[in-house]
């Protein structure tokens, strides 16, 4: 297959792992650096969407690995939609990617599916911020960007006064943040389960370094491989489905009554989890993509819509 891979930079370690895994399995990997690609819509000469990469029109792709980072997520989505419209089979549906990119929309889906997630509120009313803090159970509370990654900007406010001051400052500078119940029982630890299709293919426990409550590896956390419980697997699979993804990293916290879903990441980094488990997880994703493409093609041959 010719597989496109949307990424900010082909030097990124997860991107290079996908490229190596795809090439090992005999595929042509086409990295699509966001700034090299331009989506061209409309015009008499170009009535269909076309993609120019470095000024040259791209040949059709069989499949697509969309990845959204903090960098130009809307351009990545737009590019992805054009490529899918032109026939590429995506590893993850872009609607699901857009939901996962937004922690408020993710919470909405998790709650609607009856899955455990911290009580969450979107606070914008400067006059009633103390009410927002009380609504999620009172201080301490977690304040986090609606869309963010790697633990950046995820804060623990120990008192209502601190939480209100942080929120005031974020609101007046125009940033969207969520206020969340702090799951104290997690004690600076979480679990990252990697879901590929209908399986949990790898899991690690991450532990925050001293003086830090965020165990993200980018924040200095340490990882070790674990065998997740049946309940953790079920919750991770259900959360992935609820958000509308097939390939995801699900972050679970140990709540007082069992696992709590804190994030469903549609563009999970693979370096840390492959390093800790020794597994070829990019390869697992490519195998799933091969299956999805074969299924789409056989549906196409049956006269269905091809996807
Ligand atoms: N409500 C919470 N209670 C306790 N710990 C939390 C909470 N929210 C986040 N954390 C910790 O911070 C980490 C980063 O938060 P997360 O929501 O996953 O943001 P990011 O997308 O930046 O990784 C989580 O993996 C978790 O360990
Ligand atoms: Mg996370």
Image (cartoon, rainbow, N blue to C red):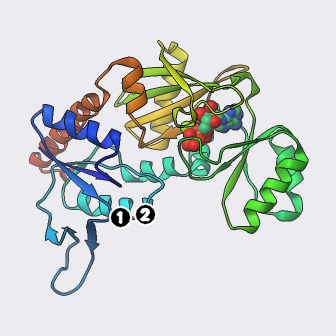
Report the residue that reaches farthest toward the bottom: 44
Q: Secondary structure at mark 1?
A: helix
Q: Is residue 287 above or below residue 177?
A: above
Give the side of residue 124 with respect to residue 35, left or right.
Answer: right
Q: Is residue 184 visible?
A: yes
Residue indicated by mark 2? 74
Q: Is residue 216 above or below residue 146?
A: above
Q: Quadrant of residue 180?
A: top right
Query: Is 186 or 88 nearer to us in this picture?
Result: 186
Query: Is 251 or 169 nearer to us in this picture?
Result: 169
- Judge the density around disc 1: few (<14), some (14-19), many (≥20) Cα neighbours within 10 Å: few
Measured from the top left, where is residue 46 in percent x and y?
A: 18, 80
What quarter of the picture does the N terminus occupy? top left
Q: Are marks 1 and 2 in contact (CB under 8 Å)?
A: yes
Q: Secondary structure at mark 2?
A: helix
Q: Is residue 189 above or below residue 118?
A: above
Measured from the top left, where is residue 289 in percent x and y?
A: 23, 38
Measured from the top left, where is residue 95 in percent x and y?
A: 42, 53
Residue sitting at 63 percent across and 26 percent down? 209
Query: Is 92 or 151 nearer to us in this picture?
Result: 151
Measured from the top left, where is residue 293 in percent x and y?
A: 18, 41
Residue sitting at 67 percent across and 62 percent down? 175
Q: Is residue 80 above or below residue 3?
A: below
The label number, if any, that marks residue 78 in the structure image: 1
Query: Is 12 or 47 nearer to us in this picture?
Result: 12
């Amino acid at each position: 297959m010719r597989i496109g891979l949307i990424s900010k930079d082909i030097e990124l370690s997860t991107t290079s792992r996908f490229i190596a895994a795809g090439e090992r399995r005999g595929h042509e990997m086409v990295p699509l650096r966001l700034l090299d690609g331009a989506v061209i819509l409309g015009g008499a000469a170009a009535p269909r969407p076309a993609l120019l990469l470095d000024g040259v029109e791209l040949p059709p792709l069989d499949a697509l690995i969309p990845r959204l980072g903090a960098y130009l997520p809307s351009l990545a989505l737009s590019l992805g939609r054009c490529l899918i419209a032109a026939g590429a089979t995506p590893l993850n549906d872009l609607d699901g990617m857009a939901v996962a990119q937004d922690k408020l929309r993710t919470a909405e889906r998790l709650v609607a599916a009856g899955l455990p997630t911290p009580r969450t509120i979107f606070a914008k009313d400067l006059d009633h911020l103390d009410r927002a803090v009380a609504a999620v159970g009172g201080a301490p509370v977690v304040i986090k960007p609606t869309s963010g990654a790697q633990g950046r900007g995820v804060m623990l406010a120990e008192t209502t006064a601190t939480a209100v001051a942080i929120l005031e400052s974020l609101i007046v500078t125009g940033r969207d943040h969520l206020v969340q119940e702090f799951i104290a029982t997690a004690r600076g630890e979480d679990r990252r389960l990697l879901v590929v299709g209908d399986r949990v293919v790898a899991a690690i426990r991450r532990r925050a370094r001293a003086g830090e409550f965020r165990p993200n590896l980018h924040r200095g956390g340490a990882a070790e491989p674990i065998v997740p419980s049946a309940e953790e697997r079920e919750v991770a699979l259900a959360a992935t489905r609820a958000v509308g993804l097939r390939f995801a990293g699900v972050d679970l916290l140990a709540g007082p009554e069992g696992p709590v879903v804190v994030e469903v990441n549609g563009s999970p980094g693979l370096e840390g989890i492959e390093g800790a488990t020794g597994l070829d997880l990019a390869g697992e994703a490519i195998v799933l993509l091969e299956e999805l493409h074969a299924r789409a093609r056989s549906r196409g041959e049956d006269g269905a819509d091809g996807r």
